[in-house]
């Protein structure tokens, strides 16, 4: 590879890797808000009221609020790609549990852990995007990696409602599992790894 070619390559954004991060953001936010479009279906399927079905959203939020910050702090030293893969695998698992479980309590527990995984994803994305990109393009890289969240925010509720009608609410969560598994393959294929934060630079829990 010539010097000019190497320089041009270094100045380009790694679009494929950034889109994988955008997909992670999409799955994370869609997992959070999709139940808002599925409340009636969840309530009927689990034989609970719609207000109790709404706790699917609350449980996710509680998981993100209560557990995500300390878990994020404890994982600062982990290599970035293995951590991202673990978190996406976690989304695959909790969405599969939600799709298959007929227990309201088990489903709420799965939603709580989904919130924990979601908090870790948000702590990873911006820093990962910056490390993937040339310094002068870091803002654009962050915007690309966050585009998945914007799409999910706009489409999440109507998409959830449409999926509920098309394949049922459990099928919708099953589809999220499939998307997470596809994303794991994508990450392994093209997203580079980076070390975690050095011990001296990590933030304390206090």
Image (spheres, grey):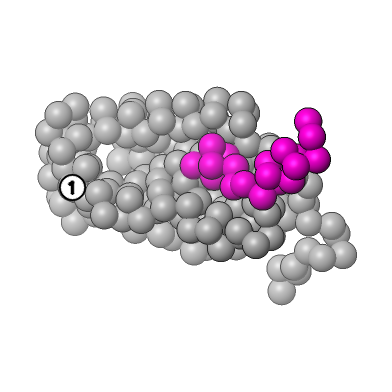
Viewer can see residue 116 = no
**What residue sits 15% from the left and 38% below the top?**
162
Residue 15 lies within the magenta run: yes
Q: Is residue 121 above or below residue 96?
A: below
- Residue 72 placement (x, y as % from top left): 64, 56
- Residue 9 placement (x, y as % from top left): 68, 41
Within-10-Å neighbours for mark 1: few <14, some 14–19, many 20+ = some
In which image quadrant can residue 86 be found?
top right
User: Which region shows up in magenta?
Assistant: 1-19
**What residue sits 46% from the left and 32% below the top?**
180
- Residue 101 placement (x, y as % from top left): 33, 30
Q: Which residue position is annotated with label 1? A: 158
Q: Is residue 44 above or below residue 77?
A: above
**Magenta stretch prevailing secondary structure:** helix
Q: Is residue 205 left or right of residue 46?
A: right
In which image quadrant can residue 38 be found?
top left
In which image quadrant can residue 173 be found?
top left
- Residue 140 placement (x, y as % from top left): 53, 58
Q: Nearer the viewer, residue 157 or 13?
A: 13
Q: How many marks?
A: 1
Q: Is residue 22 left or right of residue 87?
A: left
The quadrant the C terminus occupies is bottom right
Q: Is residue 159 left or right of residue 113?
A: left
Residue 56 lies within the magenta run: no
**What residue sits 75% from the left and 68% below the top?**
203
Q: Residue furthest right?
A: 200
Q: Is residue 52 left or right of residue 194?
A: left
Q: Nearer the viewer, residue 1 or 16?
A: 1
């Amino acid at each position: 590879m010539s010097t000019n070619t190497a320089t041009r390559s270094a100045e380009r954004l790694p679009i494929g890797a950034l889109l994988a991060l955008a997909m992670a953001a999409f799955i994370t936010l869609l997992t959070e808000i999709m139940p808002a479009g599925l409340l009636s279906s969840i309530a009927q399927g689990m034989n609970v009221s719609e207000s109790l079905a709404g706790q699917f959203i609350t449980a996710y939020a509680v998981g993100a609020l209560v557990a995500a910050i300390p878990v994020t702090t404890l994982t600062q030293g982990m290599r970035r790609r293995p951590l991202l893969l673990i978190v996406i695998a976690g989304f695959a698992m909790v969405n599969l549990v939600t799709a298959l479980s007929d227990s309201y309590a088990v489903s709420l527990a799965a939603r709580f852990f989904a919130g924990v995984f979601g908090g870790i994803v948000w702590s990873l994305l911006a820093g990962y995007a910056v490390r993937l990109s040339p310094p002068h393009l870091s803002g654009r890289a962050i915007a690309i990696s966050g585009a998945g969240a914007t799409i999910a925010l706009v489409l999440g509720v109507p998409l959830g409602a449409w999926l509920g009608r098309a394949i049922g609410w459990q099928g919708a969560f099953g589809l999220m599992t499939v998307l997470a598994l596809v994303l794991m393959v994508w990450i392994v294929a093209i997203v580079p790894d980076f070390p975690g934060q050095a011990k001296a630079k990590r933030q304390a829990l206090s």
